[in-house]
Image: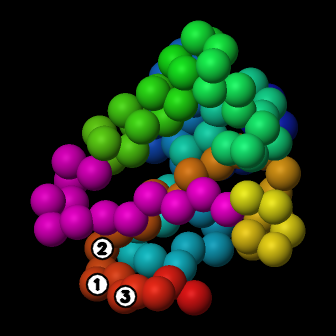
Amino acid sequence: MAGEIPADKVMETEHSIAFRDIQPVAPTHILIAPKTHVVSLDHLDTDDEQAKELWADLARVARQLGREFPAGWRLVTNIGDQGGQSVHHLHLHFLAGRQFTWPPG
């Protein structure tokens, strides 16, 4: 998250950055990640005020992106290897632009 890799950035706040996924699974697939390193949601100390603000910031970014998709959108985070986490830095997948089904996969 230090900016070494080029990214198609769509939004940035003091605490997070949102950029287009290079392997999208939906017409709109944006990753929302904190600027500080956290391995996953499981590693976020929700009793800590800074962690609460970080989580709230990620949610605000998702909601702001979601305003462009009044028909609906999906927000996903993968935790651990069995949960599908391949990048061990907390990030949310903002997915929109098509009909999603359940279960997801």
The C terminus is located in which quarter?
Answer: bottom right
Which mark, residue 9?
none
Residue 68 within the segment the image draws in magenta: yes
> How far apart are the alpha carbons under marks 2 and 3?
13 Å
Mark 2 — residue? 97
Chief SS of the magenta region: loop
Is residue 12 visible from the viewing direction of this image?
A: no
Callouts 3 and 1 close, C-beta under 8 Å:
yes
Q: Which residues are magenta?
A: 66-78
Which mark, residue 101?
3
Name the front one of labels 3 and 1.
3
Residue shown at the point (73%, 44%) measured from the top left: 42
Q: Position of residue 29 (x, y in %)?
A: 48, 65
Query: Mark 3 packing: few (<14 Cα in 10 Å), some, or many (20+)?
Result: few
Q: Amino acid at mark 2?
A: Gly
Query: Mark 1 packing: few (<14 Cα in 10 Å), some, or many (20+)?
Result: few
> How far apart are the alpha carbons under marks 3 and 1?
7 Å
**Could you say whether the residue bearing mark 2 is in a helix, strand or loop?**
loop
**Could you say whether the residue bearing mark 3 is in a helix, strand or loop?**
loop
Image color mode: rainbow
Q: Position of residue 19 (x, y in %)?
A: 55, 48
Q: Amino acid at mark 3?
A: Thr
Q: Position of residue 24 (x, y in %)?
A: 56, 74
Mark 1 — residue? 99
Nearer to the camera, 87 or 105: 105
Q: Is residue 32 left or right of residue 78?
A: left
Name the front one of labels 1 and 2.
1
Q: Amino acid at mark 1?
A: Gln
> How far apart are the alpha carbons under marks 1 and 2?
7 Å
